[in-house]
């Protein structure tokens, strides 16, 4: 089995289990998450290729993190994850990408993402539930963080934080790719993601 097929089987199992815990029918989850019933049926059968927006809507609706949909059973006390071992959850037309590296456990989990933004490529995120806080740390290059319509330049060595319950976007700036680490601090009782 390929890594992609194994990952899809894990997502399928986790969506079914979370839907059952929430007591939701396929129809109700489809309505609440604004994901077609056909896409949900395919996903629960480990078929198809769900995109990041779909996974975010499902996680938000089910009250769990995106990584909770993607992670298998715990592997031990220390988990080391290599960037090339994690498939991108978003890939832009110019080569930008976002990889969800891991999520910490506990009552207020933190998702850790690695992003590469190509110049002038943008990812727009819908607002998350109240209590979600995002932190962006640029390791190389430059980006423009757009929060509620206001643009904020963030350069290598700088970190920005904001409440994720408002429309926001990440855009590459300058002439070189921007590399950043994004953390999504979820409120107690996990919520959302970028």
Image: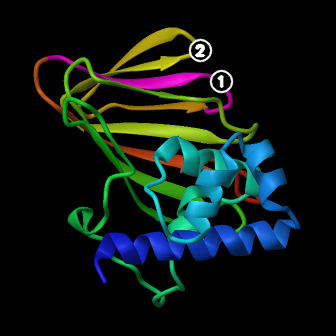
Number of numbered discs visible in the structure rendering: 2
Region rendered in magenta: 164-174
Q: Quadrant of residue 44?
A: bottom right
Q: Quadrant of residue 151?
A: top left
Q: Residue furthest front?
A: 38
Q: Residue furthest top?
A: 150
The foreground one among 33 and 88 is 33
Q: Which residue is mark 2?
A: 148
User: Which numbered disc covers residue 166?
Assistant: 1
Where is residue 157? Give x, y as percent.
26, 34
**Residue at (26%, 69%) from the top-left corner?**
85
Residue 166 lies within the magenta run: yes
Residue 193 in sight here? no
Q: In the image, is residue 32 above or below residue 25?
A: above
Residue at 78%, 53% (x, y): give it.
29
Label 2: how many Cα within 10 Å (few below 14, some 14–19, many 20+): few
Left or right: residue 97 compared with residue 14: left
CB-based contact (under 8 Å), mark 1 and mark 2: yes
The quadrant of the rendering that contains the N terminus is bottom left
Q: Indicate yes or no whether the magenta region holds residue 64.
A: no
């Amino acid at each position: 089995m390929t890594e992609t097929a194994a990952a899809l089987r894990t997502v399928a199992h986790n969506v079914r289990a979370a839907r059952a815990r929430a007591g939701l029918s396929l129809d109700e989850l489809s309505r609440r998450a604004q994901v077609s019933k056909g896409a949900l049926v395919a996903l629960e059968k480990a078929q198809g290729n769900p995109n990041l927006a779909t996974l975010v809507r499902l996680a938000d609706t089910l009250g769990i993190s995106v990584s909770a949909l993607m992670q298998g059973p715990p592997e031990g006390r220390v988990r080391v994850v290599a960037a090339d071992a994690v498939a991108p959850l978003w890939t832009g037309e110019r080569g930008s990408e976002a990889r969800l590296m891991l999520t910490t456990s506990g009552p207020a989990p933190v998702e850790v993402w690695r992003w590469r933004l190509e110049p002038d490529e943008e990812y727009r995120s819908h607002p998350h539930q109240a209590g979600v806080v995002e932190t962006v740390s640029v390791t190389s290059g430059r980006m423009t963080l757009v929060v509620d319509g206001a643009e904020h330049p963030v350069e290598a060595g700088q970190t920005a934080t904001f409440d994720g319950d408002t429309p926001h976007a990440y855009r590459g700036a300058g002439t070189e790719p921007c590399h950043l680490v994004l953390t999504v601090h979820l409120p107690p009782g996990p919520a959302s993601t970028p």
